[in-house]
Image: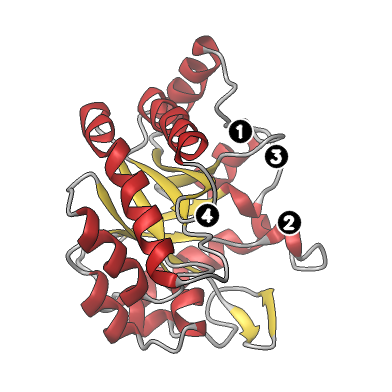
């Protein structure tokens, strides 16, 4: 298992501070939240992108993904979605990140239409993603929480540059067991996001192993070289404990699961 964490847990913090925390506590990679006010976003100049890449290289950290918020199944025109995806793909390539994370956001309508929208838009950027050496990963989230839901879209696309990101919380909320999700996503899987929460009725983030999610059952299914990224949803839970204080114990917890 290769360990990463998402900069979502350290909102707005300078990249140098994030890098220091990662290296101090033995984390090998970073999921780079791509949003306004963060160190990484599509508006970065070429020089700024180069500085980010060199800083990560010097620290020996892998930029696992550019974690964007594009909804590939969202109602509306295809053009803006494809444009946003291409911007994020170029950013990921410039930073040396292997993945771009996207959401479904299919809304409340007929799910078959959402599947087709997502598949059409992902297929439209797939060849460009492959040329850049970046893989687009559709996360188990919102309208497509289950592994089966995401796999259904990916089977329509059938392109190696388009894959899946398994968010353990959302597959749990969809009622899937880890083994069922693994069975659905195994042919498509890019990496896995883990987290822990108090329970279904209270999604406040807690230290890994202190909540209700089946992290061990998930991690033990994965190949030894699979990336596992801790996504700590700090921006929406300001009373949660600071992530920086939890990174050391979190790394030890994940290591113990595979020992």
Whether residue 29 is situated above or below residue 179 in the rendered picture: above
Q: Nearer the viewer, mark 3 or mark 4?
A: 4
Measured as percent of width and height from the top left, residue 128 is found at 27, 30
Residue labelled with disc 1: 15
Residue topped by disc 2? 235
Q: Marks 2 and 3, Cα distance to the nearest angstrom?
A: 12 Å
**Real-space Cα distance between discs 3 and 4?**
30 Å
Q: In the rendering, at what x and y percent does residue 9 appear? A: 64, 54
Up-down relation of residue 241 to residue 53 (above or below): below
Whole-Å distance between the Cαs marked 2 and 1?
17 Å
Q: Do callouts 1 and 3 mark residues in contact (Cβ within 8 Å)?
A: yes
Foreground pick, 66 / 122: 122
Query: Residue at horizontal 41%, vertical 30%?
Result: 86
Q: Position of residue 24 (x, y in %)?
A: 53, 46
Task: Name the residue beneath numbered marker 4.
Answer: 74
- Label 4, label 2: how many angstroms apart (C-alpha)? 23 Å
Residue that extends furthest to the right in the rendered view of this protein:
239
Residue highlighted by disc 3 = 13
- Res 232 visible: yes
């Amino acid at each position: 298992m290769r360990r990463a964490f998402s900069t979502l847990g350290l909102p707005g913090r300078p990249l140098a501070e994030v890098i220091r925390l990662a290296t101090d506590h033995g984390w090998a990679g970073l999921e780079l939240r791509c949003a306004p006010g963060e160190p990484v976003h599509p508006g970065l100049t070429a020089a700024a992108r180069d500085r980010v890449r060199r800083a990560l290289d010097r620290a020996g950290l892998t930029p696992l993904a550019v974690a964007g918020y594009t909804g590939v199944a969202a109602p509306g025109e295809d053009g803006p979605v494809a444009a946003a995806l291409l911007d994020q793909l170029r950013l990921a390539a410039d930073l040396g990140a292997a993945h771009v994370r996207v959401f479904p956001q299919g809304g409340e309508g007929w799910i078959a239409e959402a599947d087709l929208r997502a598949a059409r838009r992902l297929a439209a950027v797939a060849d460009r993603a492959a040329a850049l050496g970046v893989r687009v990963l559709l996360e188990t989230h919102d309208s497509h929480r289950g592994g089966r839901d995401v796999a259904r879209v990916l089977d329509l696309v059938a392109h190696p540059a388009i894959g899946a990101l398994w968010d353990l919380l959302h597959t749990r909320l969809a009622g899937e067991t880890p083994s069922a999700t693994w069975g659905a996503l195994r042919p498509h899987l890019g990496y896995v996001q883990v987290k822990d929460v108090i329970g279904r009725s209270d999604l406040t983030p807690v230290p890994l192993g202190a909540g209700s999610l089946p992290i061990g059952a998930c991690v033990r299914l994965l190949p030894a070289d699979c990336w596992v990224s801790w996504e700590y949803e700090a921006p929406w839970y300001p009373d949660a404990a600071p992530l920086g204080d939890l990174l050391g114990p979190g790394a030890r917890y994940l290591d113990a699961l595979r020992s």
